Amino acid sequence: MVFMNDDSNIPGPVRPVDDATRDVREHAAEALRMLHENQDDGNTTRTHAVDSQTTYDIKQAAKEAMEMAAKAQEVAAGQQTGTDQFSDENLLNLILAEDEMIVVEPSPEMVIGRSDSGTNYKPEIDLTQYGAYRLGLSRSHAILRRNGQHLELIDLGSRNGTHLNGRKLAAQSPQRLHDGDLVRLGNLAFRIKFQSR
């Protein structure tokens, strides 16, 4: 069973995305067209035979529409990002929900992941208490690295991957962070916020 934290509670309104909205409407219209064709068919034997296929097609269209809407949400969140300048006067907030936030004072390099009581391992940014195990975080999932006036996120070859604004990161490939970025480690999502001291 796959779990995800409820990223709908992560602050940051999503702008409408015209292309995705159009695609979702087209899928919905196609599902309705299939349903109407099935209902208008006077041949009851054929109607009965088509029902299961039509139901399957409508479910597939709805599933594709939902996937496009989720992707559009992540893309839109990425479009709302701000500056990539992170100074010594800044703290980093990881916002998991409106009432769940981790404040981090970045050091040159910090591992993000979950602790392991069996080996007494604990990463510098420990997300264990936020359901890290069931949400698919590795013990050493990613690195947050300070590089001059910038922060970088690096996936450490994690099993369930690291996503930045809806795009999966290649392992060991540093990606610069911006204020407002949406990060997903496995299925645990949070928004990045640069905060002045």
Image: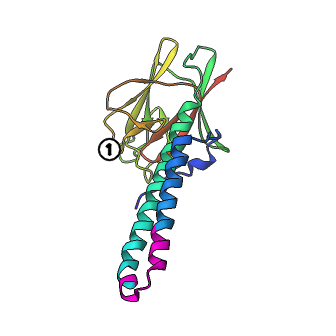
Q: How many marks?
A: 1
Q: In screen coordinates, is 163 left or right of 19?
A: left
**Principal SS element in the magenta part?**
helix
Q: Nearer the viewer, residue 138 or 124?
A: 138
Q: Residues within 10 Å of mark 1 (few under 14, many from 20)?
A: few
Looking at the image, can residue 61 be seen? yes
Left or right of 100, for residue 189: left
* Residue furthest bottom as drawn: 45
- The residue furthest top is 148
In front of the other: 171 or 146: 171
Helix, strand or loop at disc 1? Answer: loop
The residue at which mark 1 appears reads as 159
Quadrant, the C terminus = top right
Q: Is residue 189 visible?
A: no
Q: Tell whether 159 sits left or right of 149.
A: left
Q: Residue at x 48, y 45 (%)?
A: 71
Kind of residue indicated by mark 1: Arg
Above or below — where is 108 with respect to 60? above
Q: Quadrant of the N terminus?
A: bottom left
In this view, 47 is above or below 96: below
Chosen colour scheme: rainbow
Q: Residue at x 33, y 39 (%)?
A: 158
Q: Vertically, is 139 above or below 60?
A: above
Between residue 105 and residue 66, name the one nearer to us: 66
Q: x, y percentage for residue 73?
A: 54, 43
Q: Residue at position x 44%, y 61% from top?
A: 61
Q: Magenta residues?
A: 34-47
Please tell me which residue is depicted at 40% across the width and 49% down the height of the picture: 136
- x and y percentages locating residue 46 in the rendered image: 36, 83
Residue 147, image x, y percentages: 45, 15
Q: Is residue 46 magenta?
A: yes
Q: Is residue 49 magenta?
A: no
